[in-house]
Image: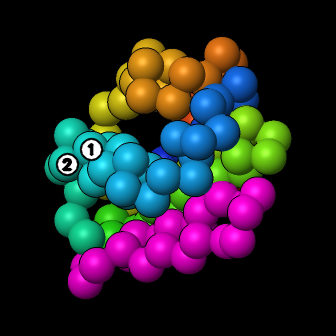
Amino acid sequence: MQVGTEWLIDASGCDAETLRDLRRIRSLCSRVLRELELQVLGEGLWHQFPDPGGLTGLYLLTESHLACHTYPEHGILTVNLHCCRPRPRWPWESVLAHELGATQVHVREFSRGVVP
């Protein structure tokens, strides 16, 4: 029985300054949540590391969670989104290329709860 879908997204070649910009990364996560019609419980929690570090953000959702981590020193953004209800595939590749300058975006999608 499938009980959810989990997406793991790795974007590389991203602009380092953008990956340090809390406002922009928070806005990106808000866009994902809004466009996928996901329901946030409370507010997202964010931690900003000292330079050259990046950001870590976490949203608790009625559907599960969204976690985001940036590594400006490596030009990398990672995202983990787990949903317990069906959602359409979001255009990670084009959005992350446009918003972050990502040159490579790798999206993995997993069905959760399925026992082979």
15 lies above or below 101: below
Asked if the residue under mark 1 is in contact with the one under mark 2, i.e. CB atoms within 8 Å, the reply is: yes
Q: Nearer the viewer, residue 18 or 8?
A: 18
* Residue 6 in picture, x, y percent from top left: 54, 49
Which residue appears farthest toward the bottom when viewing the image? Answer: 42
**Residue drawn where x is 21% and y is 40% of the image:** 35
**Residue drawn where x is 71% and y is 46% of the image:** 72
Compute the Cα span from label 2 to label 1: 5 Å
107 lies above or below 45: above
User: What coloring was used for the rendering?
Assistant: rainbow
**Which amino acid, mark 1?**
Arg
What number is the disc on residue 34? Answer: 2
**Residue drawn where x is 44% and y is 67% of the image:** 65
Horizontal side of residue 99 vs 103, given as left or right: left
Q: Nearer the viewer, residue 110 or 91?
A: 91
Horizontal side of residue 5 vs 84, given as left or right: right
* Residue 116 in picture, x, y percent from top left: 73, 46
Per the image, the residue denoted by label 1 is 31
* Neighbours of disc 2 within 10 Å: few (<14), some (14-19), many (20+): few
In magenta stretch: residue 69: no
Element assignment for label 2: helix
Magenta-colored span: 41-60
Q: Nearer the viewer, residue 111 or 69?
A: 69
* Residue 104 in picture, x, y percent from top left: 68, 19
Query: Can residue 103 be seen at all in this image of the molecule?
Result: yes
